[in-house]
């Protein structure tokens, strides 16, 4: 009898551990859907939608979410605050954690930041895990980094939705003690109408005269990886409110503006990754169709200028686009100057 209870207890323990392991695996993996017309993929989503296009079947695929953590790129060799990069929403993470977006982001900073400064990137599942959860993990990771490096404060460069995640983390009063300076780079502080377009039921747009054009734009942008319909685009909707930025935090908004002048645009395309810039310019032209008048026509291809410059002092880069915040040496070097200003010697006047 005693052996029976012992064996039963062991079996229950094994089942419990197996159940916890399975639950952990379920948290690590998500599902996405691909709509096909015959054998041709038409549209990708993280949830089933009411299709606004012709299709013959929908297939379901599993994908592994990125592990939420702070990744060391370079250890600090001085006592200056290290730089923490925070990426934005990454539609291509369904294909793997280390997308071109993250690689370009890291490569630009490695190229521009002097070697004696520490450099890290906060990686998190950006498509369907609430920002509030990822923000709590960021707080924990920074606390651990401070203990391991003995650095008390850090500079944060947050791109796009990464800036919204950082705003949630800033609600932790202990976390603000670790903040030296922040740059919100192309952060949609008050949202973007493009996100509203992504999450809405697009069938209601069929009454528009330009519906065929809009449908083509949506399908092309989706299949090229510019976006995938996912829950976290709701954080980017125009008009959505987010936690305030504490008054004690020193920060700067970096915003960019696609201009009507060809020369700076062409120069920018030649100096950065061309596909991303062309895509942003294309979306900028779409905004002029959707919003022919008003403040939304001034944007970086993704985020309206009025949204990227909200709540604080801003630096505007004309002739640049949303992708340039991670691609452009010019913008990143401006960020480095903000983080580590060089004190200019005072002029001495000599009098006889």
Image (cartoon, rainbow, N blue to C red):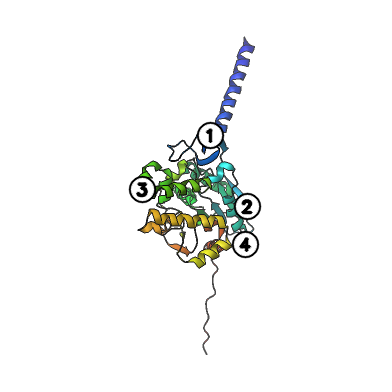
Q: Nearer the viewer, residue 336 or 237?
A: 237
In front of the other: label 4 or label 3? 3
Q: CA distance from mark 4 to mark 1?
A: 47 Å
Q: Residues within 10 Å of mark 2 (few under 14, many from 20)?
A: some
Give the x, y percent position of residue 41. 53, 40
Q: Of the residues under marks 3 and 2, which one precedes in the sequence?
A: 2
Q: Residues within 10 Å of mark 4 (few under 14, many from 20)?
A: few
Q: Nearer the viewer, residue 349 or 336?
A: 336
Instruction: Please say if 330 is above or below 187.
Output: below
Q: Residues within 10 Å of mark 3 (few under 14, many from 20)?
A: few
Q: CA distance from mark 1 to mark 2?
A: 37 Å
Secondary structure category for the residue under label 2: strand
Give the x, y percent position of residue 83. 56, 56
Give the x, y percent position of residue 81. 56, 57
Residue sitting farthest toward the top = 1
State yes or no: discs 3 and 1 in contact (Cβ < 8 Å).
no
**Residue 59, labelled with which disc?**
1
**Residue 208, labelled with which disc?**
3
Count of numbered tags = 4
Instruction: Please say if 67 is above or below 185.
Output: above
Q: CA distance from mark 4 to mark 3?
A: 52 Å
Q: Would you name the residue on which mark 2 appears? A: 73
Q: CA distance from mark 3 to mark 2?
A: 48 Å
Q: Would you name the residue on which mark 4 appears? A: 114
Secondary structure category for the residue under label 1: strand
Left or right position of 25 against 201: right
Which of the image's four quarters has the N terminus?
Answer: top right
In front of the other: label 1 or label 2? 1
Secondary structure category for the residue under label 3: loop
Q: Of the residues under marks 1 and 2, which one precedes in the sequence?
A: 1
């Amino acid at each position: 009898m005693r052996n029976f209870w012992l064996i039963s207890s062991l079996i229950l323990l094994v089942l419990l551990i197996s159940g916890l392991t399975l639950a952990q695996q379920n948290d690590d993996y998500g599902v996405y859907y691909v709509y096909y017309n015959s054998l041709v993929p038409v549209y990708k989503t993280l949830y089933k939608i009411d299709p606004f296009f012709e299709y013959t079947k929908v297939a379901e695929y599993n994908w592994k979410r990125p592990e939420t953590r702070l990744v060391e790129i370079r250890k600090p060799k001085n006592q200056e605050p290290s730089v923490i990069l925070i990426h934005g929403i990454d539609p291509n993470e369904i294909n793997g954690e280390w997308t071109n977006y993250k690689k370009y982001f890291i490569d630009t900073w490695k190229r521009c930041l002097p070697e004696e400064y520490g450099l890290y990137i906060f990686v998190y599942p950006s498509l369907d895990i609430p920002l509030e959860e990822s923000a709590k993990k960021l707080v924990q990771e920074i606390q651990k980094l401070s203990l391991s490096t003995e650095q008390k404060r850090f500079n944060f460069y947050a791109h796009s939705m990464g800036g919204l995640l950082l705003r949630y983390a800033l609600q932790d009063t202990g976390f603000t003690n670790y903040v030296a300076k922040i740059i919100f780079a192309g952060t949609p502080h008050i949202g973007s109408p493009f996100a509203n377009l992504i999450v809405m039921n697009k069938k209601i747009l069929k009454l528009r005269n330009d519906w065929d054009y809009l449908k083509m734009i949506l399908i092309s942008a989706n299949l090229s990886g510019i976006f995938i319909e996912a829950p976290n685009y709701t954080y980017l909707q125009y008009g959505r409110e987010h936690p305030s930025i504490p008054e004690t935090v020193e920060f700067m908004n970096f915003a960019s503006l696609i201009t009507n002048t060809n020369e700076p645009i062409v120069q920018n395309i030649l100096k950065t990754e061309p596909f991303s810039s062309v895509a942003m310019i294309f979306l900028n032209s779409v905004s002029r169709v959707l919003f022919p008048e008003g403040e939304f026509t001034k944007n970086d291809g993704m985020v309206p200028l009025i949204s990227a410059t909200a709540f604080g002092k801003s630096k505007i880069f004309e002739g640049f686009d949303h992708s340039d915040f991670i691609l452009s040496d010019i913008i990143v070097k401006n960020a480095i100057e903000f983080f580590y200003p060089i004190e200019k010697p005072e002029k001495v006047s000599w009098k006889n």
